[in-house]
Image (cartoon, rainbow, N blue to C red):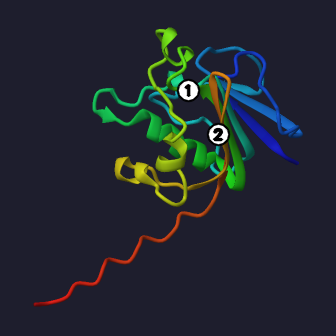
Amino acid sequence: MSKTLDMGCGSKPRNPFNAAEMYGVDIVDGLGPNIRKADLAIEPIPFESDSFEFVTAFDFIEHIPRVVYAPHRRNSFVEFMNEVWRVLKMGGYFLSSTPVYPHPYAFMDPTHVNIITDKTFLAYFDNVNRWAAIYGFNGAFAVVQNEIRDSHLFCIMQKVPVPPPAAPAATTAV
């Protein structure tokens, strides 16, 4: 039976993949039996590892700060992406739709603290470049779709195994 988890869902989790079971996470408590409370800027996703075939985030990740000091430095957005990778089953999908730079919607809401570009997922969280690994990203995603739709970046990524580290370049003694 397939399960989906919607981040920042409010009282109505979305289910674009038509999963059999729907769950959600929101910062507000008491929204429903399948919706758990968590502040994902500083807390983990409150579900077990490898629990979901699908995780979605509609107009949500722009609210996750890139860095917080609580009380020590934490790369909150990178940690959030680690958490998404953790709760997804291998081969599971993460769908994100978020306001994208340079569209004004990316900036006009004062609670938008994480500006996303069309290259953010492709370079930092993919299974090829994995640039976020230097900031503590432990996972890898194959980018299935990454396109700008009006004011939003619509991205679907699939959880894949972390590629082995590249072999060091050979050196020649002189």
Most foreground residue, 108 or 25: 108
The reply to whether residue 39 is visible in this rendering is no
Against 85, residue 56 (above or below) is above
What residue occupies the far left of the structure in this picture? 174
Q: Secondary structure at mark 2?
A: loop
Against 21, residue 169 (above or below) is below
Q: Answer few, some or many: residues within 10 Å of disc 2's Cα (few below 14, many 20 plus, some between 14 and 19).
A: some
Residue 80: where, in percent of width, then height?
51, 37
The reply to whether residue 135 is visible in this rendering is yes
Residue at 71% of width from left, 47% of height from top? 93
Q: Which mark is residue 100?
A: 1
Q: Which residue is mark 2?
A: 47
Residue at 48% of width from left, 15% of height from top? 107
Real-space Cα distance between discs 1 and 2? Answer: 28 Å
Relative horizontal placement of residue 6, taking residue 39 as reference (left or right): right
Residue 42: where, in percent of width, then height?
44, 29
Q: Answer few, some or many: residues within 10 Å of disc 1's Cα (few below 14, many 20 plus, some between 14 and 19).
A: many
Relative horizontal placement of residue 139, taking residue 2 as reference (left or right): left
Q: Quadrant of residue 76?
A: top left
Q: Secondary structure at mark 1?
A: loop
Going from N to C along the chain, the mark reached first, 1 or 2, is 2
